[in-house]
Image (cartoon, helix red, strand yellow):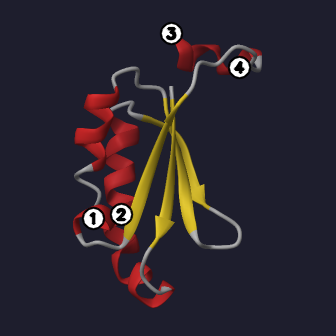
Amino acid sequence: MFLIMINYKQPLEVVDEYLASHRSFLEEGYNNDYFIVSGPRNPRVGGIIISQLTDREQLEKIIEQDPFLINNIADYEIIEFMPVKFHKGFTSFLE
Protein backbone atom coordinates (compact mmCIF):
# COMPACT_ATOMS: atom_id res chain seq x y z
CA MET A 1 0.00 0.00 0.00
CA PHE A 2 1.26 3.52 -0.71
CA LEU A 3 0.81 7.02 0.63
CA ILE A 4 1.50 9.63 -2.04
CA MET A 5 2.28 13.11 -0.73
CA ILE A 6 1.85 15.85 -3.30
CA ASN A 7 3.70 19.12 -2.63
CA TYR A 8 2.79 22.13 -4.75
CA LYS A 9 5.67 23.96 -6.44
CA GLN A 10 3.52 26.62 -8.05
CA PRO A 11 1.17 29.29 -6.62
CA LEU A 12 -2.42 28.22 -6.00
CA GLU A 13 -3.59 30.25 -9.01
CA VAL A 14 -1.50 27.96 -11.24
CA VAL A 15 -2.57 24.84 -9.31
CA ASP A 16 -6.22 25.78 -9.85
CA GLU A 17 -5.68 26.01 -13.63
CA TYR A 18 -4.82 22.29 -13.65
CA LEU A 19 -7.18 21.12 -10.90
CA ALA A 20 -9.95 19.85 -13.21
CA SER A 21 -7.51 17.77 -15.26
CA HIS A 22 -5.85 16.45 -12.07
CA ARG A 23 -9.26 15.39 -10.74
CA SER A 24 -10.02 13.63 -14.05
CA PHE A 25 -6.74 11.75 -13.61
CA LEU A 26 -7.83 10.77 -10.09
CA GLU A 27 -11.25 9.66 -11.31
CA GLU A 28 -9.61 7.35 -13.83
CA GLY A 29 -7.47 5.98 -10.99
CA TYR A 30 -10.57 5.25 -8.92
CA ASN A 31 -12.30 3.62 -11.90
CA ASN A 32 -9.27 1.33 -12.34
CA ASP A 33 -9.03 0.54 -8.60
CA TYR A 34 -5.65 2.27 -8.22
CA PHE A 35 -6.69 4.68 -5.47
CA ILE A 36 -8.63 4.44 -2.20
CA VAL A 37 -8.86 8.06 -1.10
CA SER A 38 -7.44 11.45 -2.04
CA GLY A 39 -7.78 15.06 -1.08
CA PRO A 40 -6.07 18.38 -0.44
CA ARG A 41 -3.88 18.94 2.58
CA ASN A 42 -4.79 21.60 5.13
CA PRO A 43 -3.31 24.14 4.78
CA ARG A 44 -3.52 23.79 1.02
CA VAL A 45 0.13 23.13 0.21
CA GLY A 46 -0.50 19.89 -1.70
CA GLY A 47 -2.54 16.74 -1.44
CA ILE A 48 -2.59 13.12 -0.36
CA ILE A 49 -3.47 9.97 -2.29
CA ILE A 50 -3.66 6.50 -0.76
CA SER A 51 -3.25 3.60 -3.16
CA GLN A 52 -3.85 -0.08 -2.50
CA LEU A 53 -1.49 -1.12 -5.30
CA THR A 54 1.42 -3.33 -4.30
CA ASP A 55 3.75 -2.67 -7.25
CA ARG A 56 5.70 0.58 -6.85
CA GLU A 57 6.83 0.59 -10.50
CA GLN A 58 3.20 0.33 -11.65
CA LEU A 59 2.21 3.19 -9.33
CA GLU A 60 5.07 5.37 -10.57
CA LYS A 61 3.95 4.84 -14.18
CA ILE A 62 0.40 5.83 -13.22
CA ILE A 63 1.55 8.95 -11.34
CA GLU A 64 3.61 10.01 -14.37
CA GLN A 65 0.28 10.63 -16.12
CA ASP A 66 -0.94 13.15 -13.53
CA PRO A 67 -1.25 16.62 -15.11
CA PHE A 68 0.22 18.11 -11.93
CA LEU A 69 3.45 16.18 -12.59
CA ILE A 70 3.42 16.60 -16.37
CA ASN A 71 3.07 20.38 -16.03
CA ASN A 72 5.60 20.77 -13.19
CA ILE A 73 2.91 21.87 -10.72
CA ALA A 74 3.94 19.54 -7.89
CA ASP A 75 6.53 17.14 -6.53
CA TYR A 76 5.55 13.66 -5.35
CA GLU A 77 6.79 11.58 -2.45
CA ILE A 78 5.74 7.93 -2.55
CA ILE A 79 5.82 6.16 0.81
CA GLU A 80 5.23 2.41 0.93
CA PHE A 81 3.74 0.93 4.08
CA MET A 82 2.29 -2.35 5.27
CA PRO A 83 -1.10 -2.02 7.00
CA VAL A 84 -1.05 -4.00 10.23
CA LYS A 85 -4.08 -2.64 12.08
CA PHE A 86 -7.15 -1.32 10.30
CA HIS A 87 -10.92 -0.89 10.58
CA LYS A 88 -12.90 -4.00 9.58
CA GLY A 89 -14.55 -2.04 6.76
CA PHE A 90 -11.13 -1.49 5.23
CA THR A 91 -10.50 -5.20 4.64
CA SER A 92 -11.72 -5.17 1.03
CA PHE A 93 -8.90 -2.78 0.10
CA LEU A 94 -6.29 -5.24 1.36
CA GLU A 95 -7.35 -8.26 -0.66
Q: Earlier in the sequence, mark 2 or mark 3?
A: 2
Mark 3 sits on what residue? 95
Judged from this view, the residue extending furthest toward the top is 95
Kind of residue at badge 4? Gly
For this rendering, which residue is in front, 34 or 71?
A: 71
Q: Position of residue 58 (x, y in %)?
A: 26, 30
Tell me the SS state at disc 1. helix
Give the tally of numbered discs.
4
Q: Tell whether 84 sits left or right of 30.
A: right
Tell me the SS state at disc 4. helix
Mark 2 sits on what residue? 22
Q: Tell whether 36 sits left or right of 65.
A: right
Q: Position of residue 4 (x, y in %)?
A: 49, 45
The residue at 64%/19% (across/down) is 83
Kind of residue at badge 1? Pro
Q: Earlier in the sequence, mark 1 or mark 2?
A: 2
Mark 4 sits on what residue? 89
Mark 1 sits on what residue? 67
Quarter of image, res 67: bottom left
Q: Position of residue 30 (x, y in %)?
A: 41, 40
Report, in whole angstroms, how far the alpha carbon at label 1 lies from the one at label 4: 32 Å
| Foreground disc of the pair 1, 4 | 1
| Foreground disc of the pair 3, 1 | 1
Report, in whole angstroms, how far the alpha carbon at label 3 lies from the one at label 1: 29 Å
